[in-house]
Amino acid sequence: MPTSPIEVVPRDPRYDALRRGFNQRWIADPDYVVVATTTDDVLAALTKYLGTAGDPERRRITVRSGGHCYENFVSSEDVGVIIDVSQMSRVYFDREMDAYCIEAGATNWHSTTHLYRPTGLALPGGSCYSVGLGGHISGGGYGLLSRMFGLTVDYLYAVEVVTVADGRNPEITVARRDSPDRSLRELWWAHTGGGGGNFGVITRYWFRDLPSPPAQVLARSVAWNWKDFIDHPDLFRSLVRRYGQFFEYEKTGEGPAFIRDYGYRDMFTLLKLTHMSNGKVGLVIQLDGTRSDSVDRLAAFLNWITEGFKKEGGFEIAETPLDRQMGEHPAQSALFIPTRLPWLTATQSLNDSGPNRCGKYKSAYMTEGFTDQQIEAIYRNLTDTNYKNPDALVQVDSYGGAINDIPSDATAVPQRSSVLKLQYQAYWTWGRDANEDGVYDYQDAEIDPEIADYHLRWIRKFYQDVYQPTGGVPVVPGPELPTLNTDGCYINYPDVDLSDSTLNTSGQPWHQLYYKDGYQRLQQVKLEWDPSNVFHHAQSVRVPGAE
């Protein structure tokens, strides 16, 4: 006999935890939170919600898997119901579909452990263990294996979505890559990078031809003292320039011969350009440890990007352990010496979400290395003495490799020529007892906006400064801008500032920055599968004509 899904209401002791996600800036006040354990629970929750269509007080319905939405798309004042699918976390082989099924509430860590241990296969997803796959995959998720194997969506065969095509009656819809029905194929395509919260409630994914990660990886984490870069700013500029050039040269075949001769598709790196108040700049490196030349390749890469750091008889800039939190990743002191580890062990050691705190994020794709203007802006803002926050940085992830092998229209991720992906990050805690109740919590930020505004001003100024020549954002190149090194933004690092005409003066709307020319195709999927706009947020795909 069917049962009703679990509903957590305001008087329930679980309510305060379930109305918020990872980013403590965003705390909703919903009528209730649905804890869904099956697709039928989602169907029932939507049926109930849609039955209130005539209620003038009705607020948005949203969906949460892992809770890592960076903006208030899931938790905000206008949210009346949250469907939490985090209990739907099974990972198994579906014989009928002939594919591996991963439910939408599973996290990166679920997919890692529950796939690799029994099968030796892996999804090339992110490094943060608690990120939910419902949103991670639908936005085109990537991770430390992506340069070697591509994006998560490059292996997506099918998706199960609870849709409301008529605006009244929810239905369970399975869209396959090879569905005979064109509209189903388009719905599948929309979930290969179109982002979450747009077309329905995702409940299951199926994957085929998943790759096997290397049995062993070689890992190293190093850091350099900021005080040395202050003394030698040209070496900071050189590090950033050469780091970007390395991945540009890898793609073009130009540059030093060792890049071509060795081959580096198996290497993933994260350059953590922190604000100087952190005290150090960090670099995390992982590559295939089963190759006999891995130690030499690692050394060659580091020696090339740090040219000039060594001098006769000593160092201008010495390597030190990465011994502190940088962004979402913990200290990595044990990896100062190159360390060979089983892939699963190394993945576990890097997995982290950081402490509970507030955050603001921005992003950029890059098709080439940094310009001098961009490097100067990065240095200027990271050494801003009017701002002090050790948890502020721009993280420069290596990209490209196998990601570049896929045509730009094969999935809804159009940035297939990029070689770097940037994430601008600022984290903070409330830090003051604004309401004088003896504790720090979100209520202090509600009373004192300056708690957040101090950090928002810095990261906005930083971003606008880096992309000042193109209207404050990393625009998409076109006939009138053919030589740019930027290619828009990443939908899984959403940034509502892209919709603000005072912060984005480029003339390119937010949807062009995320989706490029694919947005019109996503709009047609929206028109077909959610014409009543049941699922929406500040930067959701709009029905054509609703912009």
Image (spheres, rainbow, N blue to C red):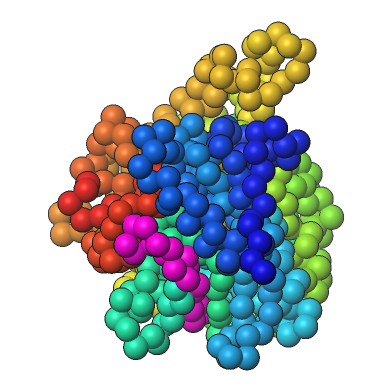
Which of 436 and 249 lies nearest the eye of the viewer? Answer: 436
Residue shown at the point (49%, 32%) measured from the top left: 77
- 215 over 505 or under it: above or below: below
* Image coords of residue 541 (percent x, y): 33, 54
- 65 over 418 or under it: above or below: above
Which of 23 and 28 lies nearest the eye of the viewer? Answer: 28
Residue shown at the point (46%, 77%) measured from the top left: 174
Please give the range of residues in magenta: 155-172
Does the segment drawn in magenta span residue 159? yes
Residue shown at the point (47%, 49%) measured from the top left: 49
Does the segment drawn in magenta span residue 391? no
Q: Using the rendered image of the protein, determine whether residue 317 is visible from the camera's viewpoint.
A: no
* Image coords of residue 187 (percent x, y): 37, 71
Question: In the displayed image of the protein, which residue is found farthest to the right?
Answer: 334
* Left or right of 300, for residue 44: left
Q: Using the rendered image of the protein, determine whether residue 397 is visible from the camera's viewpoint.
A: yes
* Image coords of residue 506 (percent x, y): 24, 41
